[in-house]
Image: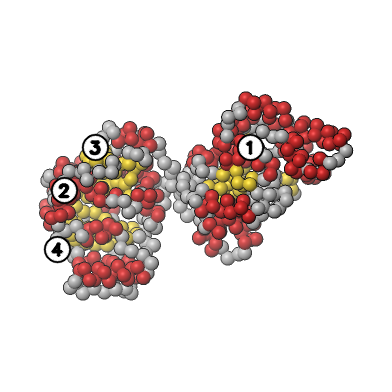
Amino acid sequence: MISVETVVAEQFPAIQTSNPLLKQSFLRFLRFIFHESEFQRFEQTYPHLMGIDFVEQVLEFFEFDFVAKDREIRHIPTSGRVVAIANHPIGSLDGLVLLKMLSKVRQDVKVVANELLWAIKPLRPMLLPVNNMGNKTPKENMAAIEKHLVDGGALLIFPAGEVSRLSPTGIKDGKWHSGFLRFAKKTQSPILPIHVDGKNSAFFYGLSMLAKPLSTLWLVHEMFKQHDREVRVRVAPVVDFETYTAIPVDDKQKIALFKKHVYAISKRRHLAEFQPQLDSVAHPEEGRLIRSELRRQPLIGTTKDGKHIYSFKHVADSAVMRELGRLRELTFRAVGEGSGKVRDVDVYDRFYDHIILWDEEDMEIVGAYRMAPIQRVREHYAEVGLYTETLFNLNNIPNHIVDQGLELGRSFVQPKYWGKRSLDYLWQGIGAYLRQHPNIRYLLGGVTISNELPIEAKASMVRFYQTYFSGDRHWVEAKTPFVAKDIHGLQFGGQDYQQEFAVLKQYMKELGCAVPTLYKQYGELCEAGGTQFLSFNVDPDFCDCIDGFVLVDIKKMKTQKYHRYIQAPVNN
């Protein structure tokens, strides 16, 4: 695993040609501080272990572990490129313990490694080598690091490039190198700050002051002094690319800020420049638990590509409900919406029904709709009411709509399934639900416009849908109305829907955005008068998004749509 002869040949070539007695004395010394015989026994016992299996066995051998808060582990992104940076107080096992922690969330994690670490062959599947000692890293190694990030991988870097030393302010890293920031900027990667609370022996720090190169070799010996210990690890929220590039200082100062931030999080503080605005989204639930729960609920359809559609009712301690909340938040944040919480869940989830599209092959929830017959809510949950009533006053809505109405909302398709007919499948699920509730004639609820859209785009959309899908507006009153009259943008005459919709789409394209999918879906669903947008409300609890109140009369659905969603069984 660690060959003293190899280390000497690669790192101390002058010794190879020196006096044989000197060479042998140096080799004996290295064998002692490298614990070569113990590593050889380890290698003979576990010759087959590679990568994370090797890491975990080494940590078990040393009985070395870490403690971290669950809510901070959630800061580790479950997918996508990310550069994790950390201090390096121990210079050995702290690196392995961070690999273990990160790999629980990111199996693709790799660490930038120096020559000594690269000499440990079982670790190489998790390493991306650099030349810290010679300071001449080959271009292909740099390219490999960048490619790992471009491909969406997770990268761990110790910016100091060496172990922490004793300083006037305590045990701290030395100068941080610029590599981590350069890689992050070039690949537009977020940066994940991590702090490890650990230390070596007093002898090591004394040796560092007298003979720094020798103290580096001594680190292997120090590793054995860490036996049966654990370190506390703090993980801060990621700092996204837009945030750190917008800080008005040069790169040298940014590197200093990141270093200061890493040490600040050990004291539960965050630098103002990196203050998190939102909680990190929860990590995924286990697919097998979700599948087990879903299979205990009614299967109401199967698509031609093998996806399953379930009608799901809330159960206590539910992996399905936790995953729905996680995926809602993940999806809504991707379009500038979201609750800002780890999961988007609320009291209504407990007594509403859920149409869930399930990918049996990938063991993932694709998307979902939440719904409830209005009359059922009024009769059994009057003290809570409808979710829509948190946004709109419905006091004037006619009784026949209440009696025959179904509230729809909280719909999503998670990003990896966008553009794959998933919304169409969910609407087939809604149709299956409606066949089980033949008394329902009306669909109603809020349809969101992201606050990330330019104000002119939002105003133009509101005007368009008020023009072509108007109705009895006195039925519904927004609690925080969106007023478009004083905002620049398009005006519409109401004479030609197709022509003016094309104008709206082109205008929004020029503004760098698009008409939200659900607005297009509702606009094409019914014959004239079948879809109405009665009011538009600003939701301060959902990133100031605009919710349009939509009312759909199923009896006025276009024949083709009615047959596809309501009449046809879900098997296409």
The quarter of the picture where residue 139 lies is bottom right
Badge 3 vs badge 2, beta-carbon distance below 8 Å = no
**Mark 4 vs mark 1: in front:** 1
Q: Position of residue 476 (x, y in %)?
A: 21, 59
Q: Secondary structure at mark 4?
A: loop
Which quadrant holds the C terminus? top left
**Mark 4 vs mark 3: in front:** 3
Decide which of tag 3 and tag 2 comes sooner along the chain. 3
Residue 186 is left or right of residue 305, and the answer is right
Q: Residues within 10 Å of mark 3 (few under 14, many from 20)?
A: some
Give the residue number, with chain letter if any, for mark 3: 299
Badge 4 vs badge 2, beta-carbon distance below 8 Å = no
The span from disc 4 to disc 2 (Cα, nearest Å) is 19 Å
Residue 306's place in the image compared with 151, above or below, is above
Badge 2 vs badge 1, beta-carbon distance below 8 Å = no
Give the residue number, with chain letter if any, for mark 2: 566
Q: Secondary structure at mark 1?
A: helix
**Mark 4 vs mark 2: in front:** 2
The span from disc 3 to disc 1 (Cα, nearest Å) is 50 Å
Give the residue number, with chain letter if any, for mark 1: 121
Tell me which residue sits at (24%, 54%) in the image: 445
The quarter of the picture where residue 299 lies is top left
Give the residue number, with chain letter if any, for mark 4: 528
Q: Residues within 10 Å of mark 4 (few under 14, many from 20)?
A: some
